[in-house]
Amino acid sequence: MSNDILTVENLKKHFVIGYTGLIHREPITVKAVDGVSFSIREGETFGLVGESGSGKSTVAYITVGMYRPTSGTIYLRGEDLFAQGDERPLRFKKEIQIVYQDPGSSLNPRRTIKDILDLPLRIHQPHKNRTLEILRLLNEVELPPDYMHKYPRQLSGGEKQIIAIARALASDPSLIVLDEPTSALDVSVQGKVINLLIRLQQELNLSYLFITHDLSLMRNVATRVAIMYLGKICEVADAAEFFQNPQHPYTQMLLSSIPVLSEEEEKLKPSKIHSIGEIPSPVNVPPGCSFHQRCPYVMDVCKVVDPVMVETGPGHTVRCHLFEQPPAPAAVPETSSTVEAAT
């Protein structure tokens, strides 16, 4: 029996942002998520990494039910989250919670912390003593009991995010979606929040879908890592394998651009990869492999045929023509007009 808590199958989300012409109008579509598949195991942290606009947050919002997919679906322990239409059953809402990037905008400034934590308890735990539950939640996230009488404006950014985590825990979930939970925080506070999340995961057997653009963070917290580019996943691997043996050119480009402090750390990074040109517009994604306009190993097939995911090792999959069978012709990196890759 599979121990996957969440299974995402060929997920697509396309947004119509306008129309062309005046008479024969054609929709202008952004393919924010375009055929994404992955699974999350019970008790693991699955890292979903990508640049801004890659579609990772859209995956998060579909997972928690804010968007309905254009096609494809998501299964929670084998049950289709969208089988009953737009109105998701309450048991699914209880099982999957989210912590947003900006705690300042995700907490109601007119409500006390007690009111904020009371709402999910009233919905999902109506038979419990909610005041005692609020005190338990505050203790679980290492905040004093008197915080229940404070307003969000009286808290620091880190404390607001900790309250947002406590709110996510109130329904007793199995999976928490973490949408860049530390990117809006000071560096000195990020470590405290990450350590809290790790402890809660161990104590409560939580599974995390951890969305970020920070590969250095993934090295320390993720069990497995997936890289997204323009709405598609280009590589998935266990975290240790991912950092030791990156295979997709885009992944190598990202890892080679991570800033380090010592020569020893520099030696652990892959060889410097140069990218060509700019990131394409998500409204006008190039044909074939969406990365081919920036790839130093581009071949003719890359410009016309979209590669498929292939397994290159146990649990390691890559969407790249370089790894398809039969072996593609040897590629020669382009050397002209190269630009340093930016994270």
Image (cartoon, rainbow, N blue to C red):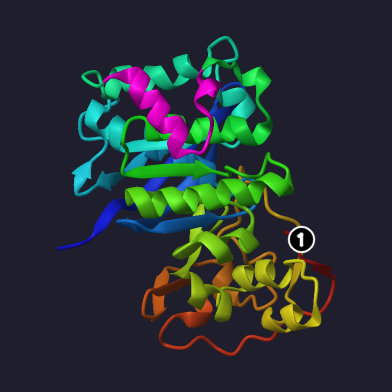
Toward the right, the furthest residue is 337
Question: Which residue is at the front of the view, 334 or 221?
Answer: 221
Is residue 205 shown left or right of residue 323? left
Observer-nearest of 150 and 31:
150
Residue 151 is at least partly visible in this image: yes
Neighbourhood count class around disc 1 (C-alpha, 10 Å): few under 14, some 14–19, many 20 upward? few
Residue 122, picture quadrant: top left
Describe residue 117's horizontal placement relative to residue 88 as left or right: right
Picture quarter with the N terminus: bottom left
Q: Is residue 90 magenta?
A: no
* Residue 114 x, y percent position in the rendering: 46, 17
Residue 137, percent from left and from top: 41, 32
- Left or right for 286, reference 14: right
Give the side of residue 286 with respect to residue 266, left or right.
left
Residue pictured at 51% horizontal, 47% vertical: 196
Check the image and report above or below for 227 versus 280: below
What's under tag 1, amino acid-wise?
A: Ala
Residue at point 55%, 78% (across, down): 247
Residue at the far top: name it.
110
Indicate the position of residue 191 as horizontal and vertical percent values: 63, 52
SS under mark 1: loop
- The image quadrant where one finds the C terminus is bottom right
Q: Is residue 108 above or below residue 298?
A: above
Task: Point out the residue furthest to the left here.
Answer: 1
- Residue stretch in magenta: 129-148
Query: What residue does disc 1 label?
Result: 342
Q: Position of residue 258 (x, y in %)?
A: 72, 66
